[in-house]
Amino acid sequence: MRNIDLKRGSVAKYDDGSPFLVESGALELGFRLPDPNGDYFVVSQTSIAEDGRKRLPIARDGRVALHVSVGELRLAVKRYIGGRLVESYGVEPLDVRSVDGTVTAYPELSALQRQAAGLEKTMQEEREARKQACAEALKAMEQNTEKAVSGVRKDALNAVHKLAVAFLRYAYTDYRRNIYVNTQNASFEQFLSAFGFSEKDFTAEELAAIKEEAKI
């Protein structure tokens, strides 16, 4: 069972953001209710249209069991007093997948945070590669060896350029497909500009490669 702290004005997240098994199609959740007064219900809906919306009461101890199917599961908690809706709480969506008969739920916001951390790491590696390339080129220049300067600079910059293309190809795929990342529906040129590049920095083949995996 995963526990969730309901918070006013923000999306409630799971106490453990790692993926977890859904046994026999039953998802057991424990909500930490902010106020014991009133009746709480959880409203669920998957991305599969025929499933429809489901509304189940939450027990006084905050527990509830949901029967879920594969797809994106969106949850909300409603609080009623005297039959009147007084509060609504958003809950972190789940991506429910089935692999080899095993059903697993992935908290989506936590997954996005891990992806963002991965992108930041890649960007940091690119910055370090650029710094190293400049340092090696400067060292070669100080040694007054024109041949060494040319070779080191060319190899280093080629390596950095290839790394940039690979990074942008991965990042643009997530940028196009993930509404949580591309909140402004920005253009491809705006995407490149956010990382300090423009289309002039790449060949037509490289631009096509960056965009290739982002096709929807």
Image (cartoon, helix red, strand yellow):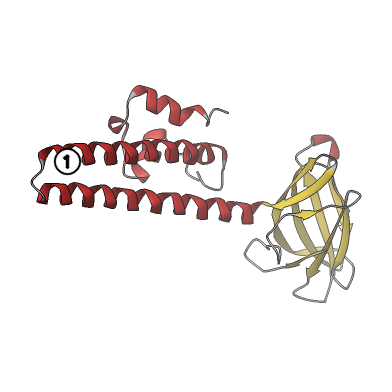
Can you give x and y, in whole percent of width and height, for residue 48 in the image? Answer: 79, 37
Residue under the image location 29 percent in, 48 percent down? 130
Kindly identify the amino acid type of the residue bearing the numbered disc 1: Ala
Q: In front here: 43 or 119?
A: 119
- The location of residue 11, given as percent across then percent down, is 65, 61
In the rendered image, which residue does mark 1 sit on? 148
Q: Is residue 101 above or below residue 82?
A: above
Q: Is residue 53 left or right of residue 137?
A: right
- Quarter the C terminus occupies: top right
Q: Nearer the viewer, residue 11 or 174?
A: 174
Please state which of residues 15 and 135 is positioned toward the viewer in this rendering: 135
Q: Is residue 202 left or right of residue 24?
A: left
Measured as percent of width and height from the top left, residue 135 is found at: 22, 52
Q: Position of residue 147 (x, y in %)?
A: 14, 37
**In this picture, residue 195 sits left or right of residue 2:** left
Say few, some or many: other residues with alpha carbon within 10 Å of mark 1 (under 14 / 14 to 19 / 20 or more).
some
Tell me the element at label 1.
helix
Quadrant of the drawing holding the N terminus: bottom right
